[in-house]
Image: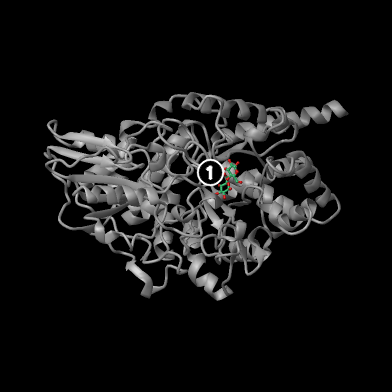
């Protein structure tokens, strides 16, 4: 009898896995019935496994993937294979996927990563400007293209899912994640966000599956009150808005992403009126799923449920009942085996209804079916050469030149390509890591040659005529006056990610200020290029500068900056955030405190 059951089960598995071979372009009703078919065969353990996401770094042993029927893995920032090169990423993906396929039902993993400005964890991938720069292009076609290329590079390594786009509309620049938002203006974010979603999800027929996007962080991540966040600052703080304000200001961005068919949405670390978003049934179920009609699945943020008041078991109960469908347990804090045990206990004790579990799992399965993952779990290496290709880099370069916002020019731009000498100085001039900012190879980014790319100095050298002598000096100390007396000075912020970038004060570095002063004292005209993830306090200095451009966090294609400097392209970038006189005077919305308004750019 027992053997007979097993035989029957095996037959039905083979049966549905054959069915999955033809799942491309199947109708929604067919997707639902297939998801139901699988769901009906699943044990509670298997359902709990589907709802569990672990960072591959924190897997105790690879066989846990099949033993616990794990539904998803991620690579958090910097979570790369031992050797960071594309083939190793692909091998890592196939290794984990093959293990997951050994589980009783053989449901494939959906593998997620923060490809937030290109496939930015992968050595050699093209790294695009962070969203603040893309916002300055105000070019939805370009954002679509950039997102599509990102997905092509993601898919080439096998990965299924990018945790992007970020739909924040940041208001307080002291927030370390300001650069992840396209604009402080929610309508611009909505427009570019929808373009990004459709770009990311447009990549089909690579290994037979589509990359899935993730709109994040739902909701109010960029609107927290100063002083309420981590370390008494901004990140993960409290957003205070009435329900009407929320609906008017922040929800349309998500509605457009849903209308663009976004498959997943990530809950936000912040609170809304004192309640953690991860535990808010009103937000995640009543509003997002019921009112707004979101049919994909909701993923929690990294250990995000852990921040709900109460012990871990109640964190799980509250968050799943609130509407989280898959938990980014990560395994860095709470062990994932503990999560699995406690989620099961919650169900067995009736604290989480089985109907909620079934809803969550069916949402996850439907996404996996809809995107072709069930048919094509394993991938070949035939697309690896697309990573960091010349064609992709040229789109990166275009994005950079369209993102540069020229804010001042006392008739020194464009620079001539035929100067006798040109001084290039500043910490950011020959520094790929600084150009890329956070979320680049490592979670917090890095300094110097972190990956393959063109620094701003390299771009300048490629552009000027052969007779021009480039005098590069990082700190400017050895520079002496010369016939042309023109200097390009690249200053700005060191890389940071999340709350590491929260700051009380956004003044320029003293080193940058004294470098510029020393060049001015020597009689140079200076064109200041600012690498930054947000507007900084430049009002006290800008009078001494001859030209000034915000170049944001341009990524690996630094020649896009020289395209503007030397006039090969006319600058088009416009501020997508107002630039205050003093960034510490609170919200950027204060119109009487502006150095440059949103939309400004020469
Ligand atoms: C961030 C998310 C990110 C996740 C996975 C979190 O700390 O808030 O934006 O997607 O980590 O790396
Ligand atoms: C991960 C990141 C994540 C962060 C959150 C890091 O270890 O690599 O992706 O966002 O932790 O705390």
Find numbered disc 1 in the image and state the secondary structure of the residue it sits on.
loop
Residue 290 image offset from top left, x and y in percent: 61, 64
Give the percent coordinates (x, y) of residue 32: 62, 48
In percent of the image, x 43 and y 33: which residue is there?
450
In which quadrant of the rendered image does the N terminus lie?
Answer: top right
Q: Residue at x 41, y 56 (%)?
A: 534
The mark tally for this picture is: 1
| Horizontal relation, residue 316 to residue 2: left or right | left
Name the residue: 83% across, 48% down: 345
Q: Kindly give the residue lying farthest to the right in the view shown.
A: 1
Looking at the image, is 278 positioned above or below residue 482? below
Which class describes the residues within 10 Å of circle 1: few (<14), some (14-19), or many (20+)? few
**Residue 263 appears in the figure:** no
Whole-percent x, y for residue 242 in the image: 58, 75
Q: Quadrant of the C terminus?
A: bottom left
Q: Nearer the viewer, residue 303 or 29?
A: 303
Q: Relative to 382, does residue 120 appear above or below in the rendering?
A: below
Is any atom of residue 586 visible in this view?
yes
Q: Where is mark 1, residue-wise?
A: 26
Q: Position of residue 596 (x, y in %)?
A: 31, 66
The residue that appears at 44% across and 24% down in the rendered structure is: 382
């Amino acid at each position: 009898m027992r053997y007979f059951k097993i035989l029957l089960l095996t037959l039905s598995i083979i049966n549905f896995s054959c069915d999955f071979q033809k799942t491309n372009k199947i109708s929604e009703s067919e997707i639902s019935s297939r998801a139901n078919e699988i769901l009906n065969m699943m044990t509670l353990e298997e359902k709990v496994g589907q709802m569990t996401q672990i960072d591959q770094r924190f897997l105790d042993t690879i066989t846990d993937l099949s033993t616990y029927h794990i539904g998803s893995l991620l690579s958090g920032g910097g979570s790369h294979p031992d050797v960071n090169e594309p083939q190793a990423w692909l091998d890592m993906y196939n290794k984990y996927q093959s293990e997951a396929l050994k589980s009783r039902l053989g449901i494939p993993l959906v593998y997620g990563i923060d490809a937030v400005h290109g496939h930015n964890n992968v050595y050699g991938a093209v790294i695009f400007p962070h969203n603040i720069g893309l916002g300055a292009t105000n070019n939805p076609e370009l954002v679509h293209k950039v997102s599509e290329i990102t997905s092509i590079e993601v898919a080439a390594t096998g990965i299924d899912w990018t945790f992007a786009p970020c739909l924040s509309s940041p208001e307080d620049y002291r927030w370390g994640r300001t650069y992840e938002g396209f604009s402080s203006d929610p309508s611009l974010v909505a427009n570019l966000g929808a373009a990004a979603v459709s770009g990311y999800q447009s990549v089909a027929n690579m290994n037979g599956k589509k990359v899935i996007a993730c709109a994040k962080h739902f909701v109010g991540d960029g609107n927290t009150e100063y002083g309420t966040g981590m370390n008494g600052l901004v990140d993960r703080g409290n957003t205070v808005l009435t329900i009407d304000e929320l609906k008017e200001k922040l929800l349309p961005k998500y509605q457009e992403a849903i209308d663009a068919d976004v498959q997943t949405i990530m809950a936000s670390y912040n609170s809304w009126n004192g309640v953690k978003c991860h535990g808010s049934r009103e937000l995640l179920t009543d509003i997002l799923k019921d009112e707004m009609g979101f049919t994909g699945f909701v993923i929690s943020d990294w250990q995000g449920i852990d921040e709900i008041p109460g012990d871990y078991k109640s964190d799980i109960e509250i968050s799943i009942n609130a509407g989280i469908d898959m938990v980014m347990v990560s395994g860095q804090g709470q062990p994932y085996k503990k999560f699995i045990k406690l989620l099961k206990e919650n169900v067995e004790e009736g604290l989480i209804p089985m109907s909620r579990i079934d809803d969550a799992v069916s949402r996850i399965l439907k996404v996996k079916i809809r995107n072709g993952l069930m048919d094509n779990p394993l991938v070949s290496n035939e697309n690896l050469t697309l990573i960091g290709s010349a064609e992709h880099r040229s789109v990166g370069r275009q994005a950079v030149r369209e993102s540069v916002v020229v804010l001042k020019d006392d008739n020194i731009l464009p620079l001539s390509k035929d100067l006798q000498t040109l001084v290039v100085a500043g910490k950011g001039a020959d520094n790929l890591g600084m150009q890329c900012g956070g979320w680049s190879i490592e979670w917090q980014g890095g300094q110097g040659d972190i990956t393959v790319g063109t620094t701003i100095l390299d771009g300048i050298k490629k552009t000027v005529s052969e007779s021009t002598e480039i005098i590069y000096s990082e700190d400017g100390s050895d520079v002496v006056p010369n016939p042309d007396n023109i200097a390009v000075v690249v200053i700005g912020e060191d890389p940071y990610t999340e709350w590491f970038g929260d700051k009380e004060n956004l003044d320029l570095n003293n080193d940058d200020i004294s470098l510029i002063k020393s060049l001015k004292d020597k009689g140079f005209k200076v064109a200041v290029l600012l690498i930054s993830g947000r507007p900084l306090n430049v009002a006290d200095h800008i009078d001494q500068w001859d030209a000034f451009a915000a170049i944001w966090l341009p990524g690996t294609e630094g020649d896009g900056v020289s395209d503007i400097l030397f006039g090969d392209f006319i600058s088009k970038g416009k501020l997508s955030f107002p630039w205050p006189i003093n960034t510490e005077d609170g919200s950027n919305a204060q119109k009487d405190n502006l150095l440059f308004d949103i939309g400004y750019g020469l």
